[in-house]
Image (cartoon, helix red, strand yellow):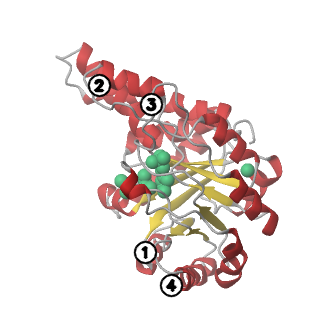
Amino acid sequence: GLVNTKEMFSRAMTGKYAVPAYNFNNMEQLQAIITGCIRSNSPVILQVSGSARNYIGAGFLPHLAAAARSMVEEARSAIPVALHLDHGNSFELAKSCIEAGFSSVMIDASHHSFEENAKLSREVVEYAHDNDVTVEAELGVLAGIEDEVVAEKSSYTRPEEVEKFLEMTGVDSLAISIGTSHGAHKFKLKPGEEPPPLKFDILEEIERRVPGFPIVLHGASSVMAKHIEQINRFGGKMENTAGIPEEQLRRAAALAVCKVNIDSDGRLAMTAAIRQIFAEKPSEFDPRKYLGPARDELTEMIIHKNTQVLGSAGRY
Ligand code: G3H
Ligand code: 13P
Ligand code: ZN
Ligand code: NA
């Protein structure tokens, strides 16, 4: 069955790795995630945003999740699987997901005041814990996508607020802002320029104040150059964009970061594969002939992340 994130995170903390949290919206993505994690013996958090849940259909989603569990059982794999609400924005949405069988939820009130954030997070924790469901909240605001104007709205997590927030809420994990951002356009670099490093001083200060507490990294896609090149080579237009370097994620995963969220990289992998097929075989019209290769590309990407970046491979 589905499990909450408690034991996954305590094992990740001890083993100095991070559990991958991959977003999905459809059957092919879900199959790729499960297949990639079974093949690499990695724990996995399947996550859906509110809009992804609407896209799939709230009534259909539990059946997809059940199918994912069956895949694990049929493969006689021992990997734990959590089903998590990503960026839940209300108590009602979190409650509805818990009633539908989710094993973990995020309540994201990070754009509200500290008090409002703590109050709403606490409310979700009370309901969730009664149902053996774990809760992730967020402190600090991630940089926006695209330009500097939006990015200025970001504010790094203040380590001195963390202990009080955890005491007030009882959450099981905390997403923090240390320089990552959502989407496929995190950094626009000049030739030869490197992305700015993450704020490891903040992460280390938080770990010092709340040792052993699981930290979550959102906006952690690397915007893999090979997929950007493939997209551009086959008719796409995604110029001059970069994400979080793998080395930075490796370092974070070895510290208190126990969950790393990846959505954009999966979208790019599928799009790259589909663009190539559409460009090379313009007469192809069987969805299996392009969604199949897209699924394979995503599976390979997931094995790569688990094995080479997060260190979650081979743990089960
Ligand atoms: O953090 C957001 C995730 O990438 C989900 O995005 O709301 O478009 O499903 P979405
Ligand atoms: P990316 O856009 O970097 O993949 O981040 C995904 C995420 O944080 C989902 O919550
Ligand atoms: Zn996120
Ligand atoms: Na870790």
Report whether residue 214 is seen: yes
Q: Residues under labels 1 and 4: Cα distance?
A: 21 Å
Residue ID at (69%, 39%): 250
Counting residues from the N terminus, which is met first, the one under dot 4 or under dot 3? 4
Q: Amino acid at mark 3?
A: Lys
**Left or right relative to 174: residue 102:** left
* Residue of label 2: 275
Q: Residues under labels 1 and 3: Cα distance?
A: 46 Å
- The secondary structure type at the circle numbered 3 is loop
Label annotation for residue 190: 3
Q: Quadrant of the N terminus?
A: bottom right
**Left or right relative to 244: residue 312:** right
On the image, which quarter does residue 240 sit in? top left
* Residue of label 1: 96
Q: Which percent across, then down, holds residue 176?
A: 60, 62
Counting residues from the N terminus, which is met first, the one under dot 2 or under dot 4? 4
Residue ID at (57%, 42%): 196
Q: Amino acid at mark 4?
A: Glu
Label annotation for residue 262: none
Label annotation for residue 116: 4
